[in-house]
Image: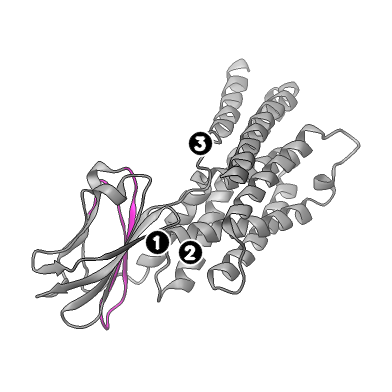
Amino acid sequence: MNTVRGLVLLVLAVLCAIGAPARADELRPGYLELTQQDAAHWKLVWKAPILGGLATRARPALPAFCAIAPRESRLDSGSVISTGDATCRGSLEGQKVGLSGMETTFTDALLRVAPLGRPVQAERLTTAQPMVEVAAKPGRWQVARTYFVLGVEHILTGYDHLLFVVSLVLLLGHLWTVVRAATAFTVAHSITLAGTTLGLFGLAQAPVEALIALSIVFLAVEIVKRREGAPRLSERVPWVVAFLFGLLHGFGFAGALREIGLPETDVPMALLTFNLGVETGQLVIVAVCLAAIGMLRRFTPQALRPATLVATYAIGITASYWFIDRLIA
């Protein structure tokens, strides 16, 4: 029994520890886009985040028969964005394109190749695979697959969103209550994610990020002050609280999508699959947390409240730091 208790407490400790990084909601891979203009000319857009090494070490790489003209560069939201043209004396079909120097960085990049009259090819460039072959007939679901994986990774490594979901589970603790609240959270952030991405409305990112941190602090306070027989507001109407905060978190997800870029002609597919990826990652978080709570409740019920408080204080302190840091940044 002690072993089981130690294992569960360790799981909770790990869930708390992931909140330590200050860059809580940073999803900034590079983005390389090649759009064919005519038989010999391609428009090149290269967006390289300063953090991670891509901006200083990686460069677009095309076949030897292509010449890249000098590019115009500008700094925008922590990334260097370069635009220019490439002239190729032959077809890129069957040739390798990607990034040179990427092997010395620790940030992934997205590649989008849009030939004239053929389907768009979307690929993920990594330090292990910095170059990919341009396909004659790209798979129909390449964009969907790429942005789905990005969505999963964002919820699992976008620590503020992750800690919000963990806090929601710690507060409610029971499967169907959590499912209803998580559903409301999902519907809400889907609304603002889609609306912001499609340009229907929007909010400035800096206050949004600060308020997201504050939403985690709110849930942490609700957990600490929870008492038997005296339900808190978030326990009485959890779906309302989750929906309202979900609207806020949707603006955060939209900010992440703006950072990584969207394929111009595939926005609906990229938006849908990114959101599905977020939901898949969210379900993983909920399942892990409920499993940990269930094990504590079954084997060492007396340890449930202390373990929850330890996790909650760690989450609350981390979120408070984020809130202050984002206010003064």
Q: What residue is pinned by disc 3? A: 21
Question: Magenta segment, which residues?
Answer: 106-130
Q: Amino acid at mark 2?
A: Thr
Q: Return the residue nearer the eye: 242 or 71.
A: 71
| Front disc: 2 or 3 | 3
Q: Which mark is residue 273?
A: 2
Q: Which mark is residue 145?
A: 1
Q: Residues within 10 Å of mark 2 (few under 14, many from 20)?
A: many
Identity of the residue drawn at 72% across and 53% down: 242
**In magenta stretch: residue 117:** yes
Q: Which badge, 2 or 3, is on the more N-terminal residue? A: 3
**In magenta stretch: residue 48:** no
Residue 35 in percent (x, y) is at 28, 74
Q: Quadrant of the N terminus?
A: top right
Q: Is residue 72 left or right of residue 167?
A: left
Q: Is residue 122 above or below residue 222?
A: below
Identity of the residue drawn at 66% across and 57% down: 248
Q: Amino acid at mark 3?
A: Pro
**Tags 1 and 2 in contact by the CB under 8 Å rule?**
yes
Q: Amino acid at mark 1?
A: Arg
Q: Is residue 75 above or below residue 22?
A: below
Q: Quadrant of the C terminus?
A: top right
